[in-house]
Amino acid sequence: MTIAGFCVVAAAILFASALQASIGFGMGMFAAPIVAMIEPAMIPGTLIMVATLVTLMVVVREREAIDLSGTGWALTGRVPGTVAGALLLAALPHQALVIVLAAVVLGGVVLTSSGWVPAARRRNVVLAGAASGLLGTATSIGGPPMALVWQRNTGAVLRSTMSSFFLVGSVISLIVLAFTGAVDVHTLRTFALLIPAAVLGYLLSRVLNRYLNPQRLRWLAIGVSATGAVVLIGRELLLTF
């Protein structure tokens, strides 16, 4: 990777880390497409390590605001959702699967933008966790389902609960990747080089959080979810031409 390429990746990690630390997700959604174009070997291992670091810092910072019950039920859904995502990847054409899942996210965005807000009751949280596991396994972008079901939470609760949910999921993913040999010396080296960018992004989020009242936070989460779905659909359509 050239110096210019590294600078672009570091900038993407910085802003993605700020987004992740502000609304609880966004690392894969914002940084993955850019990183994939410049240094594909960094995906998924290095990117998951960076996301794990950022979510860990958020969990430590706002640990008192974590909704442990919500996190637990979301993780209950994530496990079968992850398995389902792996099975669907093996059984269905990847492009069709990605487009269908992204369309589902866009449908949820349209509904919530029109005023519908899913109640964060146990059943809905479990279903969102399953959808997150399925979408994350198929596309590496699992944040939107959780953001939609938890969008009425206050800033600290949203950030900390989302971060605790993804922290556990990221650790599980890294363990699996380590067993499969996908985490190697190059993964660790690039992660170490990107730690300063991730930390700076985390610090930037502390400034952003001062301006994110509940209404702005809700619309930012909805907007990022919609953008991620559109990016997924656009990426898959472009690959066909």
Image (spheres, helix red, strand yellow):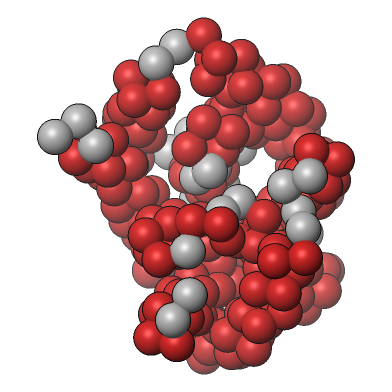
Whole-percent x and y of residue 82? 67, 27
In the picture as drawn, the residue positioned furthest to the top comes out as 91
Residue under the point 58% across and 85% down? 197
Q: Is residue 211 left or right of residue 196?
A: left
Residue under the point 49% across and 56% down? 40
* Image quarter hosting the C terminus: top left
- On screen, residue 196 above or below 155: below
- On screen, residue 136 above or below 147: above
Q: Nearer the viewer, residue 9 or 55?
A: 9
- On screen, residue 187 above or below 134: below
Residue under the point 78% across and 49% down? 174
In the picture as drawn, the residue positioned furthest to the left comes out as 241
Q: Nearer the viewer, residue 90 or 168?
A: 90
Whole-percent x and y of residue 220? 37, 63
Whole-percent x and y of residue 19? 49, 70
For residue 79, which quarter of the picture? top right
Whole-percent x and y of residue 52? 72, 63
Residue under the point 50% across and 45% down? 141
For residue 235, which quarter of the picture? top left
Q: Is residue 56 left or right of residue 13?
A: right
Q: Nearer the viewer, residue 187 or 125?
A: 187
